[in-house]
Amino acid sequence: MTNRELLEEARKARLKSYAPYSKFQVGAALLTKDGKVYHGCNIENASYTPTNCAERTAFFKAISEGDMEFEKIAIVGGKEGTNADDLCAPCGVCRQVMMEFCDLDEFQIILSDGKENIKVMSLKEIMPYGFSPSNLK
Ligand code: THU
């Protein structure tokens, strides 16, 4: 699946966002190494802290279905009523979840400005000097 196709899946996932408080809607599409796509959206809560980001929703859906091998994730986010036209990078907590399950050099994070520009980064680039399961070995 191309990066543009995966971004399109993230845009579909964003349509399911539940963000009545921030009104910032995020969608993620996580591609497994065997070609499955898991959608995730942000899910907010009146008590605020239980809020789950789109990226973690996608990861937790995949892991709970037994998928643990990931190739890349596409993320789009922006205010309700917009087309998510600015790059939306994953928050620190979501980067930490990626550290748990993804290869530092191989796993790619794909962002879009909604126009022609696509930004592709490895997990290593976006999370330098991170803490991972290998630290505990
Ligand atoms: N959000 C995500 O879903 N992913 C990110 O990486 C950044 C933030 C959500 C959480 C919250 O519902 C809203 O965006 C505003 O922070």
Image: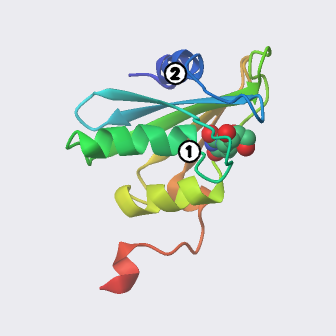
* Label 1 near ligand 1 (CB < 8 Å): yes
Task: Tell me the residue at 52%/21% (across/down).
Answer: 13
Residue type, numbered disc 1: Asn
- Vertical comparison of 100 with 6: above or below: below
Q: What is the crowding at mark 2: few (fewer than 14 residues within 10 Å), some, or many (at least 20)?
A: many
Question: In the image, is the residue at mark 2 within 8 Å of ligand 1 by its beta carbon?
Answer: no
Picture coordinates of residue 44 (x, y %)?
63, 38
Camera-nearest residue between 94 and 5? 94
Neighbor class of circle 1 (other Cα within 10 Å; few <14, some 14-19, many 20+) is some
User: Does dot 2 land on a helix, a strand or a loop?
Assistant: helix
Closer to us: mark 1 or mark 2? 1
Asked whether disc 1 touches disc 2, contact meaning CB atoms under 8 Å apart, the reply is no
Residue 89 seen in the current view: no
Quadrant location of ligand 1? Answer: top right
Colour treatment of the image: rainbow
Determine the residue positioned at 36% across, 57% down: 101
Residue highlighted by disc 1: 52
* Quarter that holds the N terminus: top left
Quarter of image, res 46 = top right
54 lies above or below 81:
below
Residue shown at the point (39%, 62%) measured from the top left? 100
The residue where tag 2 is placed is 13
